[in-house]
Image: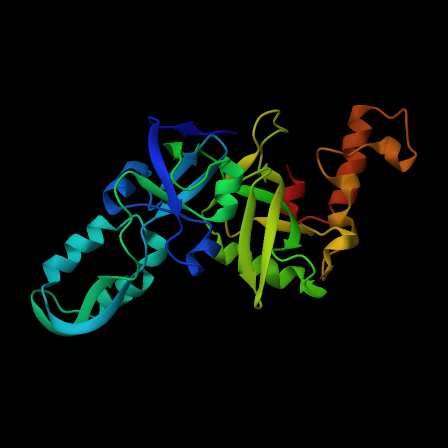
Amino acid sequence: MAGRSGHDSSMIVTNTPARDLAYTNFAYCSPSDLRKFAVHGSNLALASVGDSYVLSISYPFLYIVACFRIDFCGVLDLFECCMYACCFLVGLFDWLLVLPSGNVESNVDIDTAHESIPNGHIALNAIQRRHARVSTGDSVSVSRFIPPDDFNLALLTLELEFVKKGTKDEQIDAVQLSQQLRKRFINQVMTTGQRVTFEYHGNGYIFTVNQAVIEGQEKSKGIERGIIAAETYIIFEAPNSSGIKIVNQREAASSNIFRQKEFNLQSLGIGGLSAEFADIFRRAFASRVFPSHVTSR
């Protein structure tokens, strides 16, 4: 399910403005460019980058640094300007809630935490640039992405690896990591083949999207992608050579036998069965692995 895209435009690639922002999986642009990617009727700003993947777009974080008299209407203008950068407005919005209406004396000043990104530029981290096959200074095609209806992911299969090879062995609790990733990447679009960097318990990791299943959608021959929702069920895989041990996840959940792309009864030594029986057989095993809202598909 590809979704619809708006008018293509060319933007100049630049670096993510700060190292910590590289772990957000967001792309960054100027406030005026941000409006181009706003999804009407939502607080999302989504862009298809180089026909490779869909990224959430934001503007670098605003923080409070000094002391002066501020006009409340001016804050509203700023809020409107950045309204689509929802993930970075939490602190600002909390502060607005405690302000009385009208002009006030306040011990705050709002400033940008990073140098402004010029108009016509898009900031991508290293792994995003690698996936799109672009370097800093290159031009890349960018267009607004309009998600279709019923775009939430029911199932996401992720393969884990360390950013730095040779990192000591780590044991990862699948339940805890799932909660962290859903919280961190909620409302972000994931596409099969996409690689994303993230930090977890002090270590840098990369996950590769091996499978992205939309609830109620038949197997697609096109691009598999969808939005991470609170109900998205995440399965983790890790190569034996990765040094990552996944615990608290049923063994069948990481088995390639039951992945939609590769499921084959002959691999179990069972052949000659009808398609109907194969579907029943698959669902019987899947019911022991996946939640009911996934197996009901």
* Image vertical order of residue 287 relative to residue 165, above or below: above
Q: Is residue 288 visible?
A: no
Residue at screen point 34% across, 35% down: 11
Residue at screen point 41% across, 44% down: 56
Residue sitting at the far left: 103
Q: Quadrant of residue 153?
A: top right
What percent of the width, then of the height, locates residue 65?
Answer: 23, 71
Q: Say left or right for 3 vs 270.
A: left
Who is closer to the viewer here, 16 or 246? 16
Q: Say left or right for 105 vs 177.
A: left
What percent of the width, then of the height, locates residue 231?
Answer: 54, 50
What percent of the width, then of the height, locates residue 63?
Answer: 28, 65
Q: Is residue 126 visible?
A: yes
Who is closer to the viewer here, 34 or 165? 165
In which quadrant is the C terminus drawn?
A: top right
Q: Say left or right for 285 vs 128.
A: right
Residue at screen point 51% across, 35% down: 133
Residue at screen point 24% across, 69% down: 64
Q: Quadrant of residue 262?
A: top right
Q: How many marks?
A: 0
What percent of the width, then of the height, locates residue 202?
Answer: 56, 68
Q: How is the image coloured?
A: rainbow
* Image vertical order of residue 159 relative to residue 198, above or below: above
Q: Say left or right for 263 vs 34.
A: right
Who is closer to the viewer here, 3 or 82? 82
